[in-house]
Structures are given as structure tokens and as C-alpha cells.
Image (cartoon, helix red, strand yellow):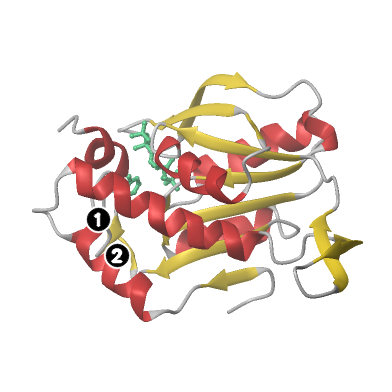
Amino acid sequence: MTENVQILDHPVIKHKISILRDINTGSNEFRSIIKEISIILAYEATKDLDLEEYEIQTPITKTTGYKISGKKLGIVPILRAGLGMVDGVLEVLPAAKIGHIGMYRDEETLMPVEYYSKLPNDVEKRDIIVVDPMLATGGSACDAIENLKKKGCKEIKLLSIIAAPEGIEKLREEHPDVKIIVAQLDDGLNENSYIVPGLGDAGDRLFGTK
Ligand code: PRP
Ligand code: URA
């Protein structure tokens, strides 16, 4: 796809996303699969972390070991549905600090409305991974990233489970510096700006609110 956009193309992901899409999949299974895919996305997002060498002794010999150099990282879920991805990303990056940005889409205007923001004090010094399972029009992600940039964040990545081409396009236009990693690219949006075929409302499916 275009520069700075990575779509995971993997049979295991396709298998798991099909279960997420299924209207008969309950919240418990839905949550575990969101977590599993988030772990894979987090590995992809951390491929470029710097390593430091150090010497280790194996039972056989001395050799060079590697550790991730002390980069400060932050995970920022967009509430609510982004919360479902945090535990998966934390499996890969247990020392990361977590900020929260609350956004909902106004059902009439479909525009994102920010209702909450609480970020680490030193957020501007951290590389940030924004997580939200759905990138539909891209409005919520663009606003959240704008908010982070205003706070001084420079290195930002976005992880999503399913994206519509429209959302990727908007992100590319407004934030071309932000790397986007998504597990699945879908066909587009319907008249209510839901992703097609999608999986419905990710927040409701995660938390059983519908
Ligand atoms: C969903 C989703 C994204 C947003 C995507 O949240 O989690 O944040 O919609 O749509 P967009 O790309 O068109 O902005 P929603 O507004 O349903 O809130 P919720 O997570 O609290 O259910
Ligand atoms: N938000 C969702 O949860 N699902 C969509 O398909 C679009 C926006």
C-alpha cells in the first residue's frame, strides 16, 4: 500500500478476524481475539526499536546478548474500544506508560467528540502507540493524534484491527508522518460510516453494551 501503511496479510489473522466479524461471537471470545491480534500488531510496531549489545554467559560459552535500549514508550487507547487492545500491547511492552483519550462519534454529525484526556506527564518524551480497533472515517484517530502532537509528541504510530480505505486516506493526508499498522483492510464505509463488512460497533461488542 502507500508509504507508512502496513497491512498484515496472514492466514492466522484472517481466521481470527472472521471470528470477530461473526455476529454470533460473544464478548468474551471477542475480547480474547482482539487481545491476540493486538499482540501481533505490537510486535510489528516495535520492529524498529534500537538494541544495545551486552555480554552474556550461556551454559556453553560467552556470547553477545541484546536488550532494547531504554526508549520511553506510551500506549494511548482511544476510549472505549481502544481499551480492548491495551493488554495485548502490554504483553509486548510491559514497561510502557498508558494515557487515555476519550472520543465518541456524534451519531448525527459522525464527527468525533473528545470527552477525556489523561496522558503521562512526560508524554512529549515518549514514542506513542495509539490503539483503536476501528479506523472508519479516520476522524477519531486524526483528532487523537492532533491532541498528542499539540502536547509535543513527535513519534506516533497507530495500530488498528480493521481499517476502511477512507480512514487510511484521511490519516495519510492529515498525519503523513504517522505509521499505520492494521490487521485487515476492508472494502469501505456504509451510509452510516460503519466499516463494510467490518464487525459492527467494536465498543459494544467488547463490552456487551448492545
Ligand atoms: C469507534 C471506534 C473508533 C471510531 C472510529 O468508537 O472505536 O474510535 O468509532 O470511527 P471514525 O474513524 O469514523 O472516527 P465509537 O465512537 O463507537 O465510541 P466507543 O468506542 O465508545 O464505542
Ligand atoms: N466504529 C465502530 O466501532 N465500527 C465501525 O464499523 C465504525 C466505527
Q: Please provide percent x and percent y for residue 15.
A: 27, 72
In front: 65, or 21?
65
**Label 2 is placed on what type of residue?**
Ile
- Whether disc 2's CB lies below 8 Å from ligand 2 is answered no
Q: Is residue 147 above or below residue 133?
A: above
Q: Please provide percent x and percent y for residue 194.
A: 29, 52
In front: 179, or 108?
179
Disc 1: which residue = 199
In the image, what residue occupies the spot 42% across and 59% down? 37
Disc 2: which residue = 17
Q: Would you say residue 165 is visible in this rendering? A: no
Label 1 secondary element: loop
- Number of numbered labels in the structure image: 2
Asked if the residues shown at circle 2 and circle 1 are in contact, with their CB atoms under 8 angstroms apart, the answer is yes
Alpha carbon of mark 2 to alpha carbon of mark 1: how far? 9 Å
Instruction: Locate the C terminus by quadrant.
Output: top left
In the image, what residue occupies the spot 59% across and 36% down? 76
| Mark found first going from the N terminus, 2 or 1 | 2
Label 2 secondary element: helix
Q: Please provide percent x and percent y for residue 201.
A: 26, 44
Residue 90: image quadrant is top right
Instruction: Locate the N terminus by quadrant.
Output: bottom right
**Label 1 is placed on what type of residue?**
Leu
Can you tell which mark lies on residue 90? Answer: none
Q: Is residue 21 above or below residue 34?
A: below
